[in-house]
Image (tube, rainbow, N blue to C red):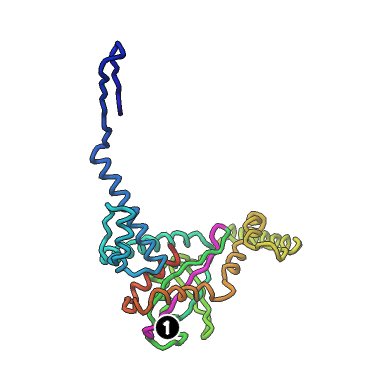
Amino acid sequence: MRITDPSPEGNGPVTVIQFALVAPSSVRDTERTDLKQELDEALVDFIVKDSQPFTVVSDPGFRALVAKLDPTCTLPSRQTVKAMVERREVEEKEKAKAALQNVDSVSLSADMWTSINMDAYLAVTCHAIHAGELSTTLVGVRPFPISHTAENIAGTARELLRQGVCGIVAECTHPRGPAIHFNSTARTSCFFPRDAEEARASRNATADAIVEVQRYLSAPPLERSQDPLVYWTTNKARYPNLYHLANQYLATPASSVPCERVFSKAGEMVSKKRNRLKPSTVEKLLFLNKNA
């Protein structure tokens, strides 16, 4: 701030007083800390989304670029970056679990892939309708060194579901074997003897369901240009029972392409330059790349 004090006669010396407004050191420290956290999060996004190695923070060219952009920026070490990725994976898994708690049902698809090191991996993706839109979540990726039989695939997939984001009843059909059912206590139904009032309520519910189906069958068919997800979201109140039933079937993907895309990205990550990545690290990077 600058203040000028001219003389009363207008021909004398002029007094100029300047003040420098400086923020308290605690405010500056907080701002620097916040900026550091934002830069660290951006660095994790850069590594995960662009399949960059952790050692990129040590590359001379990258360090020179960062120094040009912000000379005060201090890059974390490779070990620190890996720890940040692991923390981000835990956070994103919790977000995915919370999102899947609000869906009617899920459909699972699986695919297998062999890396350049001849290591086999199994990936499981989860498909559900959330807020009227079809969403896909990568449950997990697991090394698969054993024989590729339906029983072994089912066992590994169940393990992925127990440790992954799907804590709900689901069904997965594999082309090499029978349908695989995954159960959990989250949606276990208990049956008890019902009294007369419950029996009447059941009969009323059945009658309401019959009327609902008849109303649906008498409605004009959906045009091919229309989105079925939009249709059922719009008519949720009109067909409440059929709405939940439709969500179970519409969540099933027409192909395993979403799961195959996981390994398209895995081929970029497990390259000749990064052929020493541990399987657990590959799983974390792929999970974040597909879900974050």
- Judge the density around disc 1: few (<14), some (14-19), many (≥20) Cα neighbours within 10 Å: some
In x, y percent, where is residue 108? Answer: 51, 73
* Residue 204 visible at all: no
SS assignment at label 1: strand
In this view, the residue farthest toward the front is 11
Q: In which quarter of the image is residue 78?
A: bottom left
Magenta segment boundaries in residue numbering: 114-131
Front in this rendered view, residue 13 or 217: 13
Magenta residues, dominant SS class: strand
Q: Which residue is drawn at 37% across and 68% down?
A: 52
Quadrant in the picture for the C terminus:
bottom left
Front in this rendered view, residue 207 or 170: 170
Q: Residue at x 46, y 81 (%)?
A: 112
Front in this rendered view, residue 255 or 2: 2
Q: In which quarter of the image is residue 66?
A: bottom left
Is residue 119 located in the magenta-colored stretch of the structure? Answer: yes
In x, y percent, where is residue 96? Answer: 44, 62
Quadrant in the picture for the N terminus:
top left
Give left or right: position of 261 versus 248.
left
In x, y percent, where is residue 288? Answer: 40, 65
